[in-house]
Image: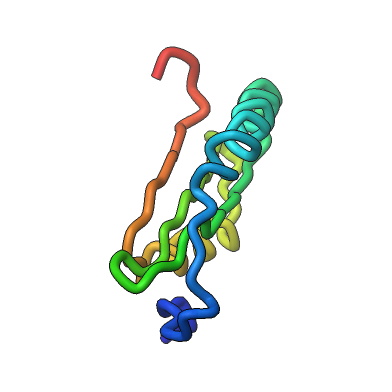
Amino acid sequence: MNNFTALTDDSNYYNLESVYDEQISPLMKQIIDICKEHNMPMVASFAYENSEEKGRGLCTTALTFEGRHIKEFADATSAIRSNHFFAAFTIMSGVKGE
């Protein structure tokens, strides 16, 4: 069991989706491109929203490459996915043309 539950205290509600979209997403695109160029495995997750109606909004990206599987990254991604309220994932194979 993990601790990924929606916070119920109103003071902990937030919506930072525009911050993610405008500031973090462009940087993540650069990071993803660099990682793909060098076959560098990575995982990153952002909780951009926590609301009473939707729970927690997440954006998670994981990159794996043939021969470069990292068990801890797979475990982390699995833990993030296991109990989400709303989530968006980008999982890329790192193979050109896919």
Q: Where is 70 relative to 11, above or below? A: above
Q: Residue at x 52, y 45 (%)?
A: 62
| Residue 3 x, y percent position in the rendering | 49, 83
The residue most toward the top is 97
| Quadrant where the C terminus is found in the figure | top left
| Residue 9 x, y percent position in the rendering | 47, 85
The residue most toward the front is 11
Q: Where is 34 relative to 79, above or below? A: above
Q: Residue at x 60, y 53 (%)?
A: 70
**What is the quadrant of residue 64 in the picture?**
top right
Colouring chosen for the image of the structure = rainbow
Q: Where is 36 relative to 61, above or below? A: above
| Quadrant where the N terminus is found in the figure | bottom left
| Residue 25 x, y percent position in the rendering | 58, 35
How many discs appear?
0
Judging depth in this view, the residue of 72 and 80 nearest the camera is 80
Q: Residue at x 60, y 28 (%)?
A: 29
Q: Does residue 62 appear left or right of residue 82 in this picture?
A: right
**What is the quadrant of residue 32 in the picture?**
top right
Judging depth in this view, the residue of 13 and 91 nearest the camera is 13
| Residue 26 x, y percent position in the rendering | 62, 29
